[in-house]
């Protein structure tokens, strides 16, 4: 089956299983999660979902939500009050414990804030994102303060990691995040403990956030699970 169609099927399955009228939703970012945003928008337009209040995790999600007429807010809006019922998002890698790497699209900071403010969390992925060990194939993104670039990269190299400043594709120079920071991509050469590193990496001065998502127990929707969710709430 064509990969984009698989992504759409997985995203729709998650929405059908978990999204209810009246929910406060986090709208994820990326090529799979955006199908969930579009499907939620279609259900809102058809009147099948009512009273939805949504928080986008990126400009991509915000623009798509606007296009489909989804009522959009921030976590600080009185209508949201800092907490969400559910967030549906994608991932760059997911291991057997449902630990994730996210941030390939550069939105990891708000993605993590929204995810950790949600009572329930769902990850939608195609089968290529399922791995045994995180960070060996897909690099771990870190959002860093621009002035900390050299010391952060040197510190990461002392940990035995390969570190690269993320360069933009259609502009000269590095990628600048939606919050004005830089991204560095970290690749590990041997298996590591994502749960421990999620906290430890944020202790490096200049690191704003990293792309490990380990303190959640998400629903996982993927073709490998037969489009059925593994339960996930915390």
Image (tube, grey):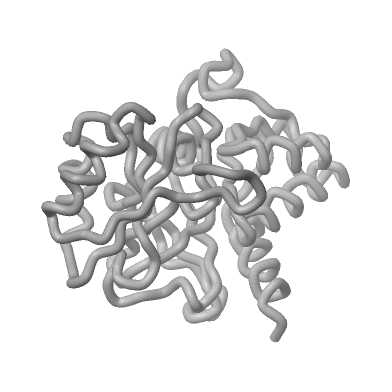
Q: Residue at x 35, y 45 (%)?
A: 142
Q: Whole-percent x and y of residue 85?
A: 51, 37
- Relative to 26, is 131 on the left or the right? left
Q: Residue at x 21, y 70 (%)?
A: 189
Dividing the picture into quadrants, the one containing residue 94 is bottom left
Q: Whole-percent x and y of residue 201?
A: 21, 43
Q: Residue at x 15, y 60 (%)?
A: 160
Count up the numbered dots: 0
Instruction: Give 69 or 196, whichever is nearer the viewer.
Output: 196
- Relative to 1, is 225 on the left or the right? left
Judged from this view, the residue extending furthest toward the top is: 78
Instruction: Give 126 or 164, whichever is nearer the viewer.
Output: 164
Quadrant location of the N terminus in the rendered image: bottom right
Instruction: Give 110 or 224, whichever is nearer the viewer.
Output: 110
Q: Is residue 104 above or below residue 22?
A: below
- Relative to 111, is 140 on the left or the right? left
Dividing the picture into quadrants, the one containing residue 64 is top right
Judged from this view, the residue extending furthest toward the front is: 172
Instruction: Give 162 or 221, whichever is nearer the viewer.
Output: 162
Q: Is residue 73 above or below residue 24?
A: above
Residue 119 appears in view: no
Residue 12 appears in view: yes
Q: Whole-percent x and y of residue 13?
A: 63, 65
Q: Residue at x 57, y 47 (%)?
A: 28
Q: Whole-percent x and y of residue 188?
A: 24, 65
């Amino acid at each position: 089956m064509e990969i984009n169609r698989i992504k759409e099927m997985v995203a729709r399955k998650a929405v059908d299983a978990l999204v209810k009228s009246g929910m406060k939703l986090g709208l994820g970012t990326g090529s799979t999660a955006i199908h969930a945003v579009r499907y939620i928008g279609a259900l809102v337009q058809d009147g099948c979902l009512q009273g939805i209040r949504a928080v986008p995790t990126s400009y991509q999600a915000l623009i798509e939500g606007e296009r489909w007429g989804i009522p959009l807010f921030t976590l600080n809006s009185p209508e949201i009050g800092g907490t969400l019922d559910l967030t549906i998002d994608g991932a760059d890698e997911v291991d057997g414990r449902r630990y994730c790497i996210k941030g390939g699209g550069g939105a990891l900071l708000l993605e993590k804030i929204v995810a950790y403010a949600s009572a329930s969390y769902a990850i939608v992925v195609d089968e290529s994102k399922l791995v045994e060990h995180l960070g060996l194939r897909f690099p771990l993104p870190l959002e860093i303060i621009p002035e900390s670039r050299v010391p952060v990269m040197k510190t990461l190299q002392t940990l035995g990691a390969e570190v690269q400043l993320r360069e933009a594709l259609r502009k000269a120079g590095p990628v600048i995040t939606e919050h004005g920071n830089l991204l560095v991509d970290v690749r590990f050469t041997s298996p590591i403990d994502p749960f421990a590193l999620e906290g430890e990496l944020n202790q490096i001065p200049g690191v704003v956030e990293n792309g490990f998502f380990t303190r959640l127990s998400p629903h996982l929707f993927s073709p490998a699970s037969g489009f059925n969710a593994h339960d996930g709430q915390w």
